[in-house]
């Protein structure tokens, strides 16, 4: 079964469409996006549309679909839905005032209605469709859609509900769910008032299934996409943000896969969707994880595809619009606080007309426009500079990464994945990524008894360093420490910024004795390294040292959190013993059975 995404967002922009999906070229699911994404040959194959409810973002392109079908004398389009939704269409859309009543026009008519009874399966050609009531301000339906070789559930606008999740749990064929997650958790109250899921509310309902399913999230505002993605990953859902124009391949016998299709622009030229052609796994669960799948999960909010084989972009890697990219085309791109700029930044440290990027014989030329606080490339002030692939541009508190060349799409997706999984200042993994890896290793320990150790690292007297040299110095020390540690650990270890000046290092297949020796090497290396910031001042060894706690998972532990608490206690003991040391000291660490 092929599920083609015509539109999947909760806010319409020039690059994003409202909900509309096409199953196997025959069955439309909602009508927010139809004609703007399909050509005439595509439309000719459509026979049915199942409608969740009659809110405008779910029906807005249905009216424009019918005149073309009528004029081409195509077979009638059957619109199936709960009686409330169909009655709204009759009374408010196809009423002869707002739009012609195509259920009465033509022979046969271009439109016919098929009322669905909640909880009762209806056969639409090869598809069995069951409508199930949801929890929304107007009556709204989810759908369980079963074809000859696959099935999925479509759960649109809703708040906490039970019936659809009971139906999914009872049907082992359904292992893919398309779900509305409109808001991040910080807008949970607004989500509740408007009858939509926030990240946590959706996760709570999905857990009612009591088995793993693939989650495809939709209906989010584009500016919330990164935040929602990070939250659902942290909450443990095997989820992907849906990608507009992608096709998801659903089958009873194989994992969910995604492939992309070539689309025609208005001039008939081919343009590519944001990811590479071909099918790619999208499952991001621990049991079937695939690196390309995780990377392309973030591609769900790569809204607009490039029409050129080579393009230049600025990607926001620090600032309000994290992950957003701006294409640098034949016209110059300007950055500043004024609304007259291509990129407007609401930042008091940014001048009204701060800097400008323009095509140049040697590439893309960046030049400062006499800004108050300057424009920086890789930390150095510039007045004019030809950008190179990968360079970072700082404007006020905002940081952009410049991407250029034939592999810019791949580089963009890699950059988005990096933003989702790493701490941008130190280069270490972020806590969300660490927790997934940590929980996976602890599951291996509890099931198979494989050794796993954890280090907790804290910079001594960090507050004094910030107070004495300034927060910029503190940031530079954190960044240099992150690089130093990353160079000295194994590829299979997971180094993470835990928070503030604390880091953790997860070490699978390593007992406490070896972990303690590694901790002592790191402590010594940090103490012996001159930390330089601003290119001038060096922080003395005495002022940059670390205390490290070391702990190994034991059979007395019953939860992953038990290991975290154990290593946190040992870090406290290292601090209490005078700082700049490892606890237990390496020579005091007992050998475990695995170590002989």
Image (tube, grey):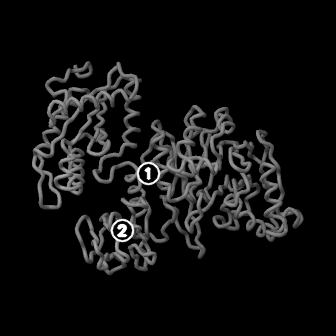
> In the shown orientation, is residue 298 left or right of residue 194?
left
In the image, residue 346 lies at what x, y percent?
A: 41, 67
Where's residue 456, x and y in %?
26, 36
Regarding mark 1 in the picture, which secondary structure is present there? helix
Q: Taking the image as drawn, is residue 156 in sight?
A: no
Residue 331's tag is none
Residue under the image location 68 percent in, 56 percent down: 25
Residue sitting nearer the eye, 461 or 136: 461
**Viewer-side residue, 309 vs 289:** 289
Q: Position of residue 194 (x, y in %)?
A: 63, 51
Q: Quadrant of residue 551?
A: top left
Q: Residue at x 31, y 66 (%)?
A: 394
Q: Which residue is mark 2?
A: 348
Q: Which quadrant of the view contains residue 211? A: top right
Note whether 62 is above or below 510 in the view shown.
below
Q: Nearer the viewer, residue 221 or 14?
A: 221
SS at circle 2? loop
Quadrant where the image shows the C terminus: top left
Q: Which mark is residue 295?
A: 1
Q: Is residue 189 visible?
A: yes
Residue 83 lies, in percent from the top left, at 81, 50
Q: Which tag is nearer the camera, tag 2 or tag 1?
A: 2
């Amino acid at each position: 079964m092929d599920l083609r995404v015509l539109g999947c967002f909760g806010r319409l922009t020039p690059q994003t469409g409202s909900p509309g999906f096409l199953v196997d070229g025959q069955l439309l699911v909602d009508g927010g996006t139809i004609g703007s994404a399909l050509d005439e040959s595509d439309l000719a194959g459509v026979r049915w549309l199942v409608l969740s409810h009659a809110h405008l973002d779910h029906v807005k392109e249905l009216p424009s679909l019918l005149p073309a079908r009528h004029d081409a004398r195509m077979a009638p389009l059957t619109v199936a839905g709960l009686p409330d939704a169909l009655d709204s269409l009759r009374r408010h859309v196809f009423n002869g005032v707002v739009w012609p009543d195509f259920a009465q026009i033509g022979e046969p008519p271009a439109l016919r209605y098929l009322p669905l009874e909640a909880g009762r399966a209806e056969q639409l050609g090869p598809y069995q469709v069951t409508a199930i009531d949801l929890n929304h301000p107007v009556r709204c339906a989810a759908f369980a859609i079963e074809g000859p070789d696959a099935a999925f559930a479509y759960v649109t606008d809703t708040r906490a509900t039970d019936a659809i999740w009971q139906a999914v749990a009872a049907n082992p064929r359904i292992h893919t769910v398309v779900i509305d997650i409109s808001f991040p958790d910080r807008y949970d109250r607004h989500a509740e008032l408007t009858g939509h899921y926030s990240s946590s509310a959706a996760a709570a309902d999905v857990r009612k299934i009591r088995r793993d399913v693939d989650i495809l999230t939709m209906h989010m505002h584009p500016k919330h996409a990164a935040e929602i993605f990070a939250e659902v990953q942290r909450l443990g859902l095997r989820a992907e943000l849906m990608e507009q124009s992608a096709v998801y391949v659903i089958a009873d016998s194989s994992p969910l896969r995604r492939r992309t299709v070539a689309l025609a622009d208005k001039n008939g030229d081919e343009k590519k969707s944001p990811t590479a052609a071909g099918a790619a796994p999208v499952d991001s669960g621990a049991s079937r994880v695939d690196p390309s799948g995780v990377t392309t999960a973030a591609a769900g909010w790569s809204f607009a595809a490039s029409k050129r084989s080579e393009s230049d972009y600025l990607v926001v890697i620090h600032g309000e619009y994290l992950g957003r990219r701006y294409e640098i085309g034949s016209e110059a791109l300007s950055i500043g606080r004024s609304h007259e700029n291509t990129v407007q930044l609401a930042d008091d440290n940014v001048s009204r007309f701060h800097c400008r990027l323009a095509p140049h014989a040697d590439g893309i030329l960046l030049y400062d426009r006499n800004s108050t606080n300057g424009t920086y490339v890789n930390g150095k002030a510039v007045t004019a500079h030809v950008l190179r692939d990968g360079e970072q541009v700082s404007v006020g508190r905002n940081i952009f990464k410049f991407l250029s060349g034939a592999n810019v799409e791949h580089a963009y997706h890699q950059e988005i994945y990096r933003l989702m999984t790493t701490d941008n200042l130190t280069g270490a993994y972020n806590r969300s990524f660490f927790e997934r890896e940590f929980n996976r290793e602890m599951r291996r320990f509890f099931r198979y008894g494989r050794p796993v150790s954890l280090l907790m690292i804290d910079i001594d007297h960090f507050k004094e360093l910030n107070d004495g040299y300034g927060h910029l110095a503190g940031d530079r020390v954190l960044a240099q420490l992150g690089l130093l540690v990353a160079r000295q650990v194994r590829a299979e270890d997971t180094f993470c910024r835990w928070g503030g000046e604390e880091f953790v290092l997860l070490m699978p297949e390593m007992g406490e004795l070896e972990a303690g020796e590694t901790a002592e090497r790191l402590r010594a290396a940090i103490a012996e390294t001159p930390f330089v910031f601003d290119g001038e001042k060096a922080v003395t060894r005495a002022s940059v040292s670390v205390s490290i706690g070391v702990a190994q998972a034991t059979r007395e532990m019953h939860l992953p959190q038990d290991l975290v608490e154990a290593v946190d206690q040992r870090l406290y003991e290292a601090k209490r013993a005078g700082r700049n040391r490892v606890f237990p000291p390496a020579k005091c660490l007992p050998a475990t059975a695995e170590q002989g």
